[in-house]
Each structure stands twice: as structure tokens, then as C-alpha cells.
Image (cartoon, grey):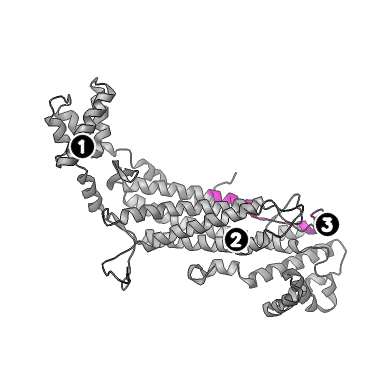
Amino acid sequence: MIERYTRPEMAAIWSEERRLAIWQEIEALALEGWATEGQIPAGAAAAVRAATVSPDDWGARELETRHDVAAFVDVLAAAMAEHGRWVHFGLTSSDLLDSALGVQLKESGALLAEGIITVFEAVQRLAIEHRDTPMIGRTHGMWAEPTTFGHKLAGFGFALVNSHQRLLQATRTVSYGKVSGPVGNHSTVSKGVERHVTEALGLHAEPAATQVVSRDRHAMFMSTLAVIGATLERIAVEIRHLQRSEVAEVAEPFSEGQKGSSAMPHKHNPILSENITGMARLLRAYATASLENVALWHERDISHSSVERVAIPDACLILDFALARVDRVLSGLTVDAQRMRANLETSHGTVFSHAVLLALISTGMERDAAYRMVQNASAEARDTGVPLREVLAAADDCPLDGQALDTAFDLNRYLADAGAGVDHLGTITPEWMRTRSVV
């Protein structure tokens, strides 16, 4: 991932130095397992941990071997003197590659889960603050019925709870390794050695590995990241629409000295939210590539390898960046409650048409006749600017009296239950999210 979209903590997980360190630890743990079974000298594992593998030396050796793991084994063995011959004893390259990948994905999943919680808390705060802030609800981009900004945000909040739960499950699904030899049947390395390595790494052992861990696990993880990205995009797209000049109900943070356009000084573009939409597109593309990696030839080919070297680290870095960006947007969001109210009133009361329809039906009017009455009156209200309530009150064929019309156009009655979702959202704590059981 390019530096522009990379944050340090996630970058450290996917750094070359971190990968080499995990490989070295796997080699040491494997030798500990062999030593426990009496197959190799007891000091070999300590010799592995004491050795230094320089990334530069490893890179130079790889130029010759054209094989990253073989180069690593050569450099590590050379740094261990008499114990060097035991390095990689009984192992194959994927025992290192896949087990290390499992560690990195587990660490990335944990970091991303905390990022989701941070965004959730930002949404929760806004939802509680705007629990009773009325606004127009829109369907198809058109005025629908009154709602509250808090209710809208509560929907985002629960989607983030779902995202967190999915990520916990996906991280558990991908926290697997294998130390079972060239075709996974333990012909050259015992199950005891594998158990020692995977347990020490905090991983599960793939129960029936080929040369690799089954790639459906990784496809599930990557697909989950894409779904989370889509949820962030949902939030971003809503902000982009509400920030449009004609709507102007919310606005992204705009810092002092910032320029919205190189040509038009008046511009405050929703660039942060637009960027989040772009990140979500990348995550979907990487998920598709990961699905292609599931069907490998026989016990393994390497058609997945080049994809994963790019897609998996990039996807983790992208989602980490996107979560931080959404938190920045929400934490600095300007909400114009007066504009929301003004836009609501601009509808001339037509957003109450459903309540009027139900009131007319309750008087005994046939549904279609009631529908046509409200439809025609709404058109007149839009065309003339006369409020719908007044249009109906002046209509000779409208059976609703003043009290019935007041009830139908009562905003408070309309929104009486809109805060329930916010109240529920307010009961959810980060600790509850962290400790929620994963099925």
C-alpha cells in the first residue's frame, strides 16, 4: 500500500522485519518440539533465537536462490554454526509462510476490531446527541417521511456492531497455521511438533492441510473486510449526499488553511467521504481476488501467492486507514439542525401524506380514493406552496376535521418511537463488543 494510505501500527504488522521475525520464531519453536521428542540437540532452538538474520543478507541470498524461504533458511543456518543443519528440519516453505500469515492476520484482525469500536463510539455519541433532531427521511433520494438524525445514526451503529461480530468470527476462522510437511500428512514432521508451534503462536492447526492452509479461510476474512468497507461506504455516501449544496444538513470537518478546490475558493468538497468510497471499492476487488485463490491445483500451486503478497496486506492497511478516516469525519462532523428543520418545512407538509392517507381510510373511505385525494392535494401543495394541511382543510370532499388534521400533521406524534433505536444503541459498550461470544 502506498504511504499516503498507510498507518504505522498496521504497517508494522506487515513489515518485512516482522515477517522474518515470525519465520525465525517458527523455526525455533519447531526445533523446541523436535528436542522435546528427543530428535535433535536441546540447544538448537536457542541457537535459532540467538541468530541474526539481516533483511539485506536475506535479500541478497534471495537474488541467488530465487526463493524467499530457501534464502531465509540458508542465512539463518549460516548464522548458527554447528546447529545450523537442524534449521527447517522436516518442514516445507508453507509451514513458515502460512503459519506466519496466520499470526499476521490474527494481529491485524485484533487491530481492526478496535478500529471498528472507535468508529462505533463516534456514531453512538452523535446518535445520542441527535436522538430527537428531526429531519426528512429520503427514499430514492426523494422526500419520504420525517425521521430523526439520531435514528439514521443508530442504523449505522448497529451495522458497525454487526461488522465487529463478523470480524471476530473471520479472524478466528483465519487464525490457523500448519506445520505438517510437503503435502500436509505429517510424513516428515510430527503432529506433536505442529501442536507445539501453533499453540505457542496462538493459532489453531489446520486439521487436514495440504501443503497449505485451506484458502477458504482467507477468502472469508477478505470478504468480511469488504463487507465492513461497504458499511463504512454506506456512512460516507450518506454524508456526501447530506453535504450537497442543495441539502447542506451536515458537513465534513474542514481545517484552517485547507483548500477545497484549486480553482474555486468557495468549495468545501466532501473529499474524506469520497476517499472512503474509493477504499471500499479496493476492498471489494481484493475480496474477489481472494475468492479466486480458493481452488488450487491438487495439494498446492502458487497461483495464490502473488495475489496474497499484495492483496492481504493492502486490504488490512486499507481498512485500517478507512476506519481512522471515518472516525475523523464523524468526530468533526458539523450537523445543521436548523437546516434539517428548514428542509423538512420546505416539503409544505407533503411528508405527512401517509398519516393523512391512514386518517382518511379510518373514516371509511376506500383506500384508492383516499390515496388519490392525498396525491392530488400534495401536487397542489408542491405547485402552489400552500401547505398540504391547508389544501385539505379547504377541500369540500375531505372528511377530516381540524382535530384529525392536527393529529395527522403532528411531528412529535410521528417521531414518538424514533428514539427507541438510539436508546438501545446507547446501552452497548465497547467491553460488551469485545467479550461478545462468537458462534
Q: Which residue is mark 1?
A: 379
Relative side of 346 to 87, left or right: left
At mark 1, the secondary structure is: helix
Q: Quadrant of the N terminus?
A: bottom right
Spatial CA span between label 1 and label 2: 54 Å
Quarter-of-image position of residue 372: top left
* Range shown magenta: 165-194
Relative side of 121 to 150, left or right: right
Q: Nearer the viewer, mark 1 or mark 3?
A: 1
Q: Residue at x 45, y 54 (%)?
A: 232
Q: Is residue 28 magenta?
A: no
Q: Say few, some or many: other residues with alpha carbon within 10 Å of mark 1 (under 14 / 14 to 19 / 20 or more).
A: few
Determine which of the numbered discs, if any, sits on residue 312 in the image.
2
Q: Does residue 404 lie above or below 142 as drawn?
A: above
Dot 1 amino acid type: Ala
Q: Residue at x 45, y 62 (%)?
A: 324
Q: Residue at x 82, y 53 (%)?
A: 185
Determine which of the numbered discs, if any, sits on residue 190 in the image.
3
